[in-house]
Amino acid sequence: MASSVKEPILTADRLTVFRETYAVIQDVSFTVEAGTDTAIVGPNGAGKSTLMQALLGVLPHQAG
């Protein structure tokens, strides 16, 4: 029988990103598994673009 455990392809562990002196993202943790669809949703100014830029290495992160 095949295992139903999916391989993680992206993991963030307690990610924190500052813009100047303000923590835009603080202690965010999640795992994205292979073969899954994932969406990042939220209102304007919630930090969605900042999260993606930090994950891609465009913005430096202070922790995580």
Image (cartoon, rainbow, N blue to C red):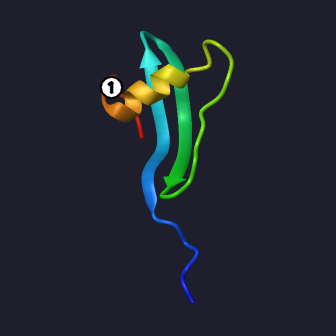
* Residue 62 seen by the camera: no
* Residue 55 seen by the camera: yes
Q: Is residue 5 above or below residue 45?
A: below
- From the viewer's perspective, tell me whether residue 35 is left or right of residue 64: right
Counting from the top left corner in percent of width and height, residue 58 is at: 31, 24
Q: Residue at x 62, y 19 (%)?
A: 46
Counting from the top left corner in percent of width and height, residue 21 is at: 46, 11
Instruction: Identify the residue under disc 1.
Output: 60
Q: Is residue 32 above or below residue 48?
A: below
Task: Locate the N terminus by quadrant.
Answer: bottom right
Q: How many dots with numbers?
A: 1
Q: From the viewer's side, name the closer residue of 10 and 13.
A: 10
Query: Mark 1 Cα within 10 Å, few/some/many (few <14, many 20+)?
Result: some
Q: Residue at x 39, y 34 (%)?
A: 55
Q: From the viewer's side, name the closer residue of 25 and 9.
A: 9
Kind of residue sitting beneath label 1: Pro
Counting from the top left corner in percent of width and height, residue 31 is at: 52, 51
